[in-house]
Image (cartoon, rainbow, N blue to C red):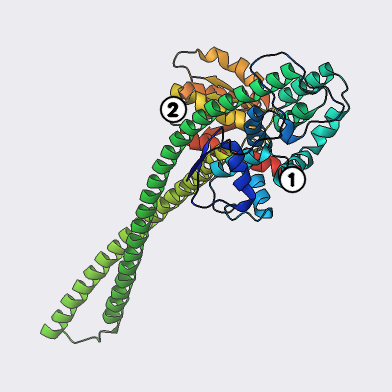
């Protein structure tokens, strides 16, 4: 069955006895004892009393925003579990929200418990706002909380404060409404960047898989070369044993045959020795190539881990720390690279808490700007695959003269920069210990 709850429609095959009355009221079957506050005009004083408003006394127009802003879905689900509602564990987030909005307007046990839950969760803000005695003091506290990003608790404390009038209630409601739009826009931008990073991560995974396949092939080839070299050594030892163990025969045809055989064995031994030297050289070259590939695979793994960390950070809720890498206040200079990636590189630096200065490495900007940029930066980066030799040499020389570190990046990709930031954060953590 479908039941309209003012802000949403809930589809549910079974209704719990606890919430049946709520649905009936929202459908207009039962009268509501709550006090109605019309937000369509600014006339009138909402409260006028000396006590705080109760949840069911607020306008029904405010219940959706109060429940959605001041309580999380986890809070609401746990609340209905405690009420022993059979739908609490299986209902969707939208249904849980709608059930809470329905219960917020009734002066019964669920409504009172919801009010108590809101007071308990936002006790700090309620206590702080209780010290305000005038409308202007409440408005000042509300605006200060919005500036600090402490909207949920301040919203509940403002709406229920006895000094809050119709105009302030409307101001707080409109502020929360617009913040929800801004959050939606921000989430869409984060989703777009997340998809871009996921595509890059997929490409890195494919490259790592190819490198691992090449490493496996090189290891198999090395093992085959080792077996062939061992066989050559065994053949050489056998040939030498035969040549030294051959008895001295008298002159004549038998002696001539032995000398020919000895010459053949010696020639064969020399050929085997040459092949052995060649195989040893090939083995050495293979070992060097494998070592290079292993180092490259390790670099790729570190970059993938850094990219995954960036993805996880981008997916975290807004309550997460702003600068998880602990590089707050540092200035990074990035010389070279691709212009289209600068915004994404700057986003990584901002997320780490730093500020990114850039120089295109001499493509359009003159290298005479580098001394000033190096003097402003705390550390310099440049991708070795996308920077001029002159620019990279200048950065190295200027950093050495100023006693500042510089980090050559393996590539101009985002993953290399993210891995370098992670390495800096790890070094800072070790130094702090």
Count all numbered tags in the image, as a single digit: 2
Q: Are marks 1 and 2 in contact (CB under 8 Å)?
A: no
Front in this rendered view, residue 415 or 310? 310
Q: Residues within 10 Å of mark 2 (few under 14, many from 20)?
A: some
Q: Which residue is mark 1?
A: 113
Residue 87 locus on image (x, y percent): 57, 52
Q: Is residue 172 above or below residue 351?
A: above
Q: Is residue 370 left or right of residue 171?
A: left
* Percent x, y of residue 151: 70, 29
- Disc sitting over residue 11 in the figure: none
Q: Residue at x 83, y 28 (%)?
A: 129
The answer to whether 314 appears left or right of 222 in the picture is: right
Q: Position of residue 164 (x, y in %)?
A: 79, 22
Along the viewing direction, whichever of 277 and 138 lies nearer the viewer: 138
The residue that mark 2 highlights is 386
Point 58% across, 35% down: residue: 28
**Separation of residues labelled 1 and 2 (CA atoms):** 62 Å
Q: Is residue 273 above or below residue 78?
A: below
Front residue of this view, candidates 105 and 120: 105
* Secondary element at tag 2: loop
Tell me if 150 is positioned left or right of 6 in this view: right
């Amino acid at each position: 069955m479908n039941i309209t709850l003012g802000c949403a429609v809930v589809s549910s095959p079974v209704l719990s006895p606890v919430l049946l009355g709520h649905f009936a009221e929202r459908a207009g079957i039962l009268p509501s004892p709550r006090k109605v506050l019309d937000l369509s005009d600014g006339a009138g004083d909402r409260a006028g009393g000396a006590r705080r408003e109760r949840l069911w006394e607020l306008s029904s127009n405010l219940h959706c925003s109060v429940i959605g802003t001041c309580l999380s879905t986890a809070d609401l689900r746990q609340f209905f579990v405690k009420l022993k509602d059979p739908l609490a564990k299986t209902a969707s987030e939208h249904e849980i929200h709608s059930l809470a909005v329905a219960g917020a307007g009734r002066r019964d046990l669920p409504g009172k418990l919801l009010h108590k839950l809101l007071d308990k969760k936002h006790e700090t803000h309620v206590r702080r706002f209780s010290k305000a005695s005038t409308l202007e003091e409440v408005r000042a506290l509300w605006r200060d909380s919005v500036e600090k990003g402490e909207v949920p608790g301040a919203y509940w404390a403002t709406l229920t404060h006895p000094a809050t009038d119709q105009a302030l209630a409307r101001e707080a409601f409109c502020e929360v409404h617009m913040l929800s739009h801004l959050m939606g826009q921000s989430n869409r931008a984060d989703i777009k960047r997340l998809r871009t990073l996921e595509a890059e991560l997929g490409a890195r995974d494919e490259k790592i898989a190819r490198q691992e396949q090449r490493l496996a092939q090189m290891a198999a080839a090395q093992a085959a070369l080792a077996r062939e070299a061992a066989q050559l050594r065994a053949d050489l030892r056998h040939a030498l044993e035969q040549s030294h163990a051959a008895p001295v025969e008298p002159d004549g045809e038998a002696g001539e045959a032995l000398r020919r055989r000895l010459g053949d064995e010696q020639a064969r031994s020399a050929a085997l020795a040459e092949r052995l030297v060649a195989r040893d050289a090939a083995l050495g070259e293979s070992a060097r190539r494998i070592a290079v590939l292993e180092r490259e695979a390790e670099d790729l793994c570190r970059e993938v881990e850094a990219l995954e960390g960036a993805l996880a950070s981008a997916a975290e809720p807004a309550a997460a720390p702003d600068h998880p890498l602990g590089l707050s206040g540092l200035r990074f200079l990035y010389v070279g690279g691709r212009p289209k990636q600068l915004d994404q590189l700057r986003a990584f630096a901002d997320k780490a808490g730093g500020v990114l200065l850039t120089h295109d490495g001499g493509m359009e900007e003159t290298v005479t700007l580098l001394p000033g940029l190096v003097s402003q930066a705390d550390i310099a980066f440049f991708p070795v695959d996308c920077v001029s030799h002159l620019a990279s040499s200048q950065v190295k020389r200027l950093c050495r003269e100023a006693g500042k570190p510089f980090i050559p990046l393996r590539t101009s990709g985002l993953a290399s920069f993210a891995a370098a930031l992670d390495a800096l954060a790890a070094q800072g953590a070790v130094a702090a210990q």
